[in-house]
Image (cartoon, rainbow, N blue to C red):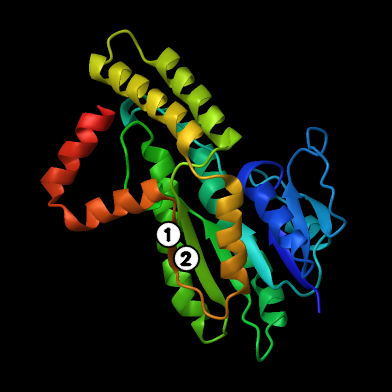
């Protein structure tokens, strides 16, 4: 029997790779949440169905439900945006907009579609809620405090939710990749340049220096990070698993960061991060 999955942020990067990987199994019909149809490079697989979705404007949830099947076997909350800049000078309205997409969007989607996940439960099948977090859900770097705030918040809200859904046999997993070679990195670089241009002349010189260092690290990550297909393969395995782990770290860089944060004394870890990012 074919199963149904809904993936947000499906037009590019990790989201697109997840849609294509699921469809390629020939076991899934994938409902791909896309904000802008006009800029979309068309999907080739017939099992991928487009769904109009703007996470920054979920004013009419009925419109989304009308595009969904009555039973959903998995939802993948993938869509997200980045915003760079020191806390002191970040525009609060932009930070709120980031929360709308990165945090409130996945929360609203999950609230809306949980009844359809429950409807898909079978004796040998557990519906899945998958969230694409980040190593930035576990370890924060300077110069993007609100991005990390959204990712930490996602980890917290869905850790709570996994207990709430356990008796209903709905499984929850947060995938935490490190650097991934997608246009998200390029957009992050653009955000860094914007943050630099918005620093007032009297701002501490350390802010400009730190953001410039982070920009260089982002460029390196865009060349050396995991492929979106590698993350997508992990997501497919999670979705098709009987009982996946709650938190899964993807990428050698992410695993190293988490290992160091877990095992090093706090001051030692902070010293490493200060040397790298400030």
Name the residue rendered at 68%, 84% in the picture. Answer: 121
User: What is the distance, in whole Å, between disc 1 and disc 2 at their CAs?
Assistant: 5 Å
- Front in this rendered view, residue 142 or 60: 142
Q: Around disc 1, counting alpha carbons within 10 Å, would you say few (fewer than 14), some (14 to 19), or many (20 or more)?
A: many
Asked which secondary structure carries label 2, the reply is: helix
Q: Which residue is mark 1?
A: 155
Q: Find residue 92 and report its horizontal and vertical position in percent.
A: 44, 32
Reply above or below: 204 against 186.
above
Q: Find residue 7 and report its horizontal and vertical position in percent.
A: 68, 56
Q: Find residue 81 and report its horizontal and vertical position in percent.
A: 55, 39
Asked which secondary structure carries label 1, the reply is: helix
Residue 122 shows which numbered tag?
Answer: none
Name the residue rendered at 70%, 73% in the picture. Answer: 73
Name the residue rendered at 72%, 65% in the picture. Answer: 5
Q: Find residue 274 and report its horizontal and vertical position in percent.
A: 21, 33
Q: Which residue is mark 2?
A: 158
Reply above or below: 17 against 94.
below
């Amino acid at each position: 029997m074919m199963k149904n999955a809904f993936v947000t942020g499906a037009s590019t990067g990790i989201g697109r790779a997840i849609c294509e990987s699921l469809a390629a199994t020939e076991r899934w019909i994938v409902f791909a949440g896309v904000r802008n149809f006009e800029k979309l490079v068309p999907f080739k697989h017939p099992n991928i169905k487009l769904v109009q979705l703007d996470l920054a404007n979920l004013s009419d949830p009925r419109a989304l439900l009308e595009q969904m099947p009555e039973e959903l076997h998995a939802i993948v909350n993938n869509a997200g945006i980045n915003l760079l800049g020191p806390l002191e000078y970040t525009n609060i309205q932009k930070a709120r907009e980031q929360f709308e997409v990165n945090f409130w969007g996945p929360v609203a989607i999950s609230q809306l579609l949980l009844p359809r996940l429950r409807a898909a439960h079978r004796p040998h099948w557990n519906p899945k809620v998958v969230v694409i977090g980040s190593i930035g859900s576990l370890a924060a770097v300077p110069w993007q405090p609100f991005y990390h705030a959204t990712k930490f918040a996602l980890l917290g809200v869905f850790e709570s939710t996994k207990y709430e859904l356990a008796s209903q046999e709905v499984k929850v997993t947060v995938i935490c990749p490190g650097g991934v070679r997608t246009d998200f990195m390029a957009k992050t670089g653009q955000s860094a340049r914007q943050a630099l241009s918005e620093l007032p002349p009297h701002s501490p010189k350390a802010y400009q220096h730190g953001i410039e260092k982070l920009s260089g690290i982002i460029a390196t990550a865009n060349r050396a990070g995991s492929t979106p297909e590698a993350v997508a393969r992990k997501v497919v395995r999670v979705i098709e698993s009987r009982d996946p782990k709650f938190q899964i770290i993807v990428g050698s860089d992410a695993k190293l960061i988490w290992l160091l944060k877990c095992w090093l004394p706090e001051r030692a870890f902070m010293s490493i991060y200060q040397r790298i990012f400030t």
